[in-house]
Amino acid sequence: MYQKEIVYIGLYKDGNRLGSAGFLKVENKEQTSSLYLKVQNIPSGISGSFPIRVYNGSGWQELNGVAIQDGRGSWERRLTENVEKTVIQIMLPGGYMLEGKGKSAAAGAPYDPFAAKEPPEEPAHKPDEEIREETFAPEPEKERQSEELSREPSPVIVTEELPGVSAANIDVMPRKMPGCDLKENKWEQILDTYEKIHPYGDGRVYVKLEPADFVILQEKYQHLVNNSFLLHGFYNYRYVILGKEGDYYLGVPGVYYEREKMVALMFGFEAFECPGGNMRPGEFGYYLRKVEL
């Protein structure tokens, strides 16, 4: 069986389509699929390697990045499975996104919070409604998607360690530690090494990190340097946070909306907290997940 499809890609900013930006060629043969991506008309100033999300007919996969320079780039990959009902997305800095959908995608692809469209209108909360912190209880289907997208790529996918973080103006080498006395307690050492902040306006102390600093986490969490949701937040605010409240929590800065909450959950960030605890649409805060040092 041989199938070929051309998926045309658009450039979006804040949900608005700006124009065409290339194509993805999909060739299915037996139980393999060949993908060839060409992008162009990318705004000047955007360069580096950016993660690719592909819907393959049954779920989303996150693959290693496409290198973009001088407004254009190309990428190709062979997968040991067929790709059908194709949707491709690439998050770019500055609120830009590349997205393309195959002809059969609309009927088969599940709702995707990253889709390039205006977010639904958020219901207003009563002024006296206060929520200190919410832990999202995912429905079974969303929980399955969250587990698939937050873990490292499945072995059947021909992929490799994402090189794109450094190319995307993020240095993957750990920052040089300032001169300070070494401490036996790792958290105290981190507090002495990195910039301290009070993200919620109270006595709780967190530190500011960059993806390059994830070497301080246990090895099983270092793959978060490739997490699209985390990188999207880092591109927008240029930092993430780490704190200790019994457990250790990694936080991505962002604004609370129902749509954004769904994206965070799919990528493993299960809670949200904001200064003052008044969690309502448009409120700035942090999407959180547990990690270990």
Image (cartoon, helix red, strand yellow):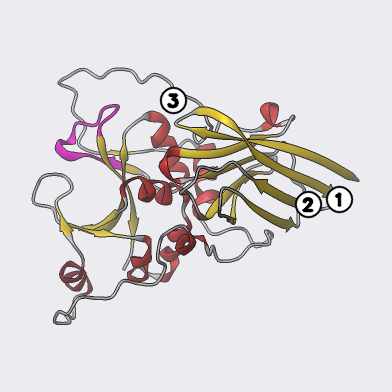
Distance from the alpha carbon under mark 1 to that under mark 3: 37 Å
Residue 249 appears in which quarter of the rendering?
bottom left
Magenta-colored span: 272-283
Relative placement, left or right, of 57 versus 222 is right
Three-letter amino acid code at the position of disc 3: Pro
Q: Residues within 10 Å of mark 3 (few under 14, many from 20)?
A: some
Is mark 3 in CB contact (under 8 Å) with mark 2?
A: no
Secondary structure of the residue carrying numbered label 2: strand
Can you say whether 60 is above or below 241 in the image?
Answer: above
Identify the residue at horizontal 86%, vertical 50% (top origin): 29
Nearest the viewer among 99 and 137 is 99
Identify the residue at horizontal 17%, vertical 67% (top origin): 191
- Closer to the chain start, of discs 3 and 2, is 2
Question: Residue 29 — which label?
Answer: 1
Can you say whether 81 is above or below 190 in the image?
Answer: above
Relative placement, left or right, of 244 versus 146 is left
The residue beneath circle 3 is 119
Three-letter amino acid code at the position of disc 2: Ser
Can you say whether 192 is above or below 287 in the image?
Answer: below
Secondary structure of the residue carrying numbered label 3: loop
Q: Is residue 233 highlighted in magenta? A: no
Three-letter amino acid code at the position of disc 1: Lys
Quadrant containing the C terminus is bottom left
Q: Residues within 10 Å of mark 2 (few under 14, many from 20)?
A: many
Spot occupied by residue 268 in the image (x, y as percentages of width and height): 43, 49
Secondary structure of the residue carrying numbered label 1: strand
Identify the residue at horizontal 89%, vertical 45% (top origin): 2
The residue beneath circle 2 is 33
Distance from the alpha carbon under mark 1 to that under mark 2: 6 Å
Q: Is residue 276 highlighted in magenta? A: yes
Identify the residue at horizontal 42%, vertical 59% (top origin): 169
